[in-house]
């Protein structure tokens, strides 16, 4: 068997990184080519149980990043949300940002306070929002991910794109950092405590 020298490995790493970047650009371009899906102005529930229309989440902007979170019971979703909290000012510099979960408003509020989350949270409990947008299965289980929306000048709302979250995805940096460790992430799982 031929020996592989470090400079050959580094060369192969560089080639693969270029290929990955190229594929990511291709994926982004393909996602942007999807037709925008007009959706209704759903009613969700704010931190005090007040009714909040989806259109209100845009504030004075025409773009919205909306995180679909499985709720307090999911340590993975908590880890993703902790990460978004850290980059919130950067996200909000570009678009409106909010998180929606099936937890009731009081549970959300208390959990957000315990995590020191600064972003807006909404409850979809008792609504068809998650199911209609493809983030709730027939069995009633929820899936994490993100939907991006655009609001036109006439007030109509369109979903521009969506993606699902999971270990190794592009939305949580810990996986990519763990991949650099000698044993990768192994069987590591997130925990609530720091």
Image: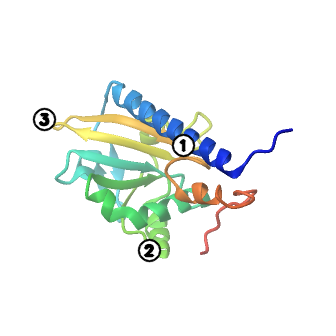
* Helix, strand or loop at mark 3: loop
Q: Is residue 79 left or right of residue 65?
A: right
Compared to residue 139, the image places residue 66 above or below, namely below
Compared to residue 117, the image places residue 21 above or below, namely above
Disc 3 or 2, which lies upstream in sequence?
Answer: 2
Measured from the top left, where is residue 69 in percent x and y?
50, 52
Measured from the top left, where is residue 10 in percent x and y?
62, 48
Measured from the top left, where is residue 138 in percent x and y?
59, 33
Q: Residue furthest right?
A: 1
Quadrant (top left, top right, bottom left, bottom right) of the C terminus? bottom right
**Could you give the CA–CA distance between mark 2 and mark 1, rounded to whole angstroms?**
36 Å
Between 92 and 159, the one lying in front of the other is: 92
In the rendering, which numbered label is found on residue 62? none
Measured from the top left, where is residue 35 in percent x and y?
33, 24
**Could you give the CA–CA distance between mark 3 and mark 2, rounded to whole angstroms?**
36 Å
* Helix, strand or loop at mark 2: loop
Q: How many C-alpha atoms fall within 10 Å of the one at disc 2: few (<14), some, or many (≥20)?
A: few
User: Would residue 80 be visible to someone looking at this image?
Assistant: yes
Disc 2 designates what residue?
116
Q: At 49% across and 51% down in the image, what residue appears?
A: 171
Disc 1 designates what residue?
17
Q: Is residue 98 left or right of residue 82?
A: left
Q: At 47% across and 40% down in the image, what residue appears?
A: 21
Between 18 and 165, the one lying in front of the other is: 18
Q: Nearer the viewer, mark 3 or mark 1?
A: 1
Disc 3 designates what residue?
154
Label total for image: 3
User: Would residue 74 be visible to someone looking at this image?
Assistant: no
Q: Residue furthest left?
A: 153
Q: Nearer the viewer, mark 2 or mark 1?
A: 1
* Helix, strand or loop at mark 1: helix
């Amino acid at each position: 068997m031929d020996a592989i020298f470090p400079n050959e490995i580094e060369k192969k790493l560089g080639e693969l990184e270029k290929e990955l970047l190229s594929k990511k650009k291709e994926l982004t371009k393909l996602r942007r080519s999807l037709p925008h899906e007009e959706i209704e102005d759903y009613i969700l529930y704010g931190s005090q149980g007040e009714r909040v229309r989806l259109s209100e989440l845009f504030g004075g902007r025409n773009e919205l990043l909306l995180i679909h979170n499985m709720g307090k019971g999911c340590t993975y979703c908590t880890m993703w949300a902790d990460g978004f909290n850290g980059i919130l000012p950067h996200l909000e510099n570009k678009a409106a940002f909010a998180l929606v979960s099936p937890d009731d408003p009081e549970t959300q509020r208390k959990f957000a306070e315990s995590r020191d989350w600064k972003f807006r949270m909404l409850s979809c409990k008792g609504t068809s929002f998650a199911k209609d947008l493809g983030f709730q299965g027939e069995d009633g289980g929820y899936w994490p991910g993100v939907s991006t929306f655009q609001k036109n000048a006439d007030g109509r709302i369109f979903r521009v794109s969506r993606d699902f979250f999971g270990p190794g995805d592009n939305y949580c940096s810990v996986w990519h950092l763990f991949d650099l460790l000698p044993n990768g992430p192994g069987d590591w799982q997130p925990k609530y405590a720091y």
